[in-house]
């Protein structure tokens, strides 16, 4: 997901909400964002994101990241 969402101020609260919900807690969240500062990265990880990637993302890296998070 992106952290810059249309209907909300940012995606950090959404990540926190997902991680607070027992039903969705185990779903890994990948942040894909044009923002790349250390602050945004830290907010994402503190909110519960598994990975932070910057745009434009390398397609192969994104695929490998997603595949690494799939159940084996």
Image (spheres, helix red, strand yellow):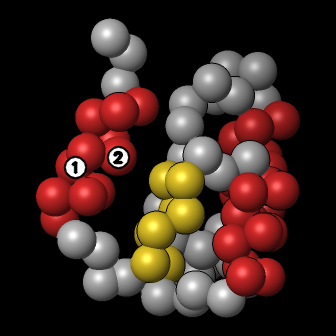
Residue drawn at x 63%, y 24% as measured from the top left? 26
Name the residue tied to disc 2: 65
- Could you tell me which residue is drawn at 79 percent across and 62 percent down? 13
At x 46%, y 68%, the residue is 53
Q: Which residue lies furthest to the top in this view?
A: 72
10 Å crowding of disc 1: few (<14), some (14-19), many (20+): few
Residue 6 position by quadrant: bottom right
Quarter of the image holding residue 5? Answer: bottom right
Res 5 visible: no
Disc 2, SS: helix
Say which mark, if any, is on residue 63.
1
33 relative position to 8: left or right: left
The local secondary structure at tag 1 comes to helix
Q: Quadrant of the C terminus?
A: top left
Q: Is residue 71 above or below residue 66?
A: above
Q: Whole-percent x and y of residue 55?
A: 37, 82
Would you place residue 34 above or below residue 33 in this image? below
Q: Nearer the viewer, residue 17 or 40?
A: 40
For residue 12, the mark is none
Q: Residues within 10 Å of mark 2 (few under 14, many from 20)?
A: some
Q: Nearer the viewer, residue 47 or 57?
A: 57
- Image position of 51 (left or right of 57): right
Q: Position of residue 45 (x, y in %)?
A: 74, 57
User: Residue 19, percent across and down?
Assistant: 75, 38
CA separation in Å, label 1 and label 2: 5 Å
Residue 51 picture location, percent across and down: 55, 53
70 to 66, vertically: above or below: above
Q: Are dots 1 and 2 in contact, CB under 8 Å?
A: yes
Q: In this view, does 19 lie to the left or right of 64?
A: right
For residue 54, above or below residue 47: below
Closer-to-camera residue (54/29): 54
């Amino acid at each position: 997901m992106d952290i810059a969402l249309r209907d909300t101020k940012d995606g950090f609260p959404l990540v926190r909400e997902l991680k607070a919900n027992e039903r969705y807690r185990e779903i890994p969240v990948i942040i894909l964002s044009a923002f790349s500062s250390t602050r945004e990265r830290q907010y994402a990880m503190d909110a519960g994101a598994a990975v932070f990637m910057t745009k434009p993302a390398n397609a192969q890296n994104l695929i490998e990241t997603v595949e690494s998070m799939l159940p084996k």
